[in-house]
Image (cartoon, rainbow, N blue to C red):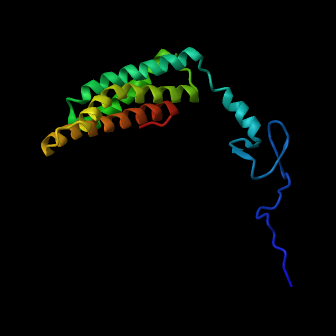
Amino acid sequence: MTETQNTNPIPDETPVLRCNRCNEPITPATAVSTPTGYRCRNCVKAQQKVFDTTRFFDLVLGFLIAGILAYAGGWLVSRLGFFTLLVAPSVGMLIYRAVRLAVNKRRSEALNRAVLAGAIIGCIPMLVPQIISLLFFSGEAFSFLSNILPLIWRVVYTVLVASTAYAQSKGLRL
């Protein structure tokens, strides 16, 4: 005797809810819970687009400001060593505040990504010479250590600046 097994582990759900904005039927799996009730994904997307207020020039400006300030801070890091851990988040917050001031407090996810990309790309010119000098070290252990430590601090700086600027622009507060 053979039993037929259900190949569909999730049964088809019938709509049992209604969107409180457009009154379309929605299933519990596709419903989005909001403070005012359940909404369909289309209504939630439409509401979120209201908050995306940036213009194309804001993206360019945010990218440039983030890149320039990250580069300027990267120049300073080569002289700080351990204190990079304290300075890098401050540079990330400076980037966020400068971009926010320059774009007149407009916001969007694209602007957040532009700030992140600008901060990372602004750090690259300081990373490349360190990587090249590490690849072509003379072979002595002391030379290797003297080249790897500045590279480590620059990588730490890049990660901290980019993540702090992005987190601040996303709305996460430190």
Quadrant in the picture for residue 76: top left
Q: Nearer the viewer, residue 131 or 99?
A: 131
Q: Is residue 19 above or below residue 59?
A: below
Quadrant in the picture for residue 137: top left
- Image coordinates of residue 145 in percent, x first then y, are 18, 42
Q: Is residue 67 above or below residue 167?
A: above
| Residue 100, visible in the rendered structure | no
Quadrant in the picture for residue 158: top left
Which residue: 80% across, 51% down? 27
| Residue 10, visible in the rendered structure | yes
Specify the quadrant that holds the C terminus. top left
Which residue: 13% across, 43% down? 142
Which residue: 26% across, 38% down? 135
- The residue most toward the bottom is 1
Specify the quadrant that holds the N terminus. bottom right
- Image coordinates of residue 62 in percent, x first then y, are 48, 20
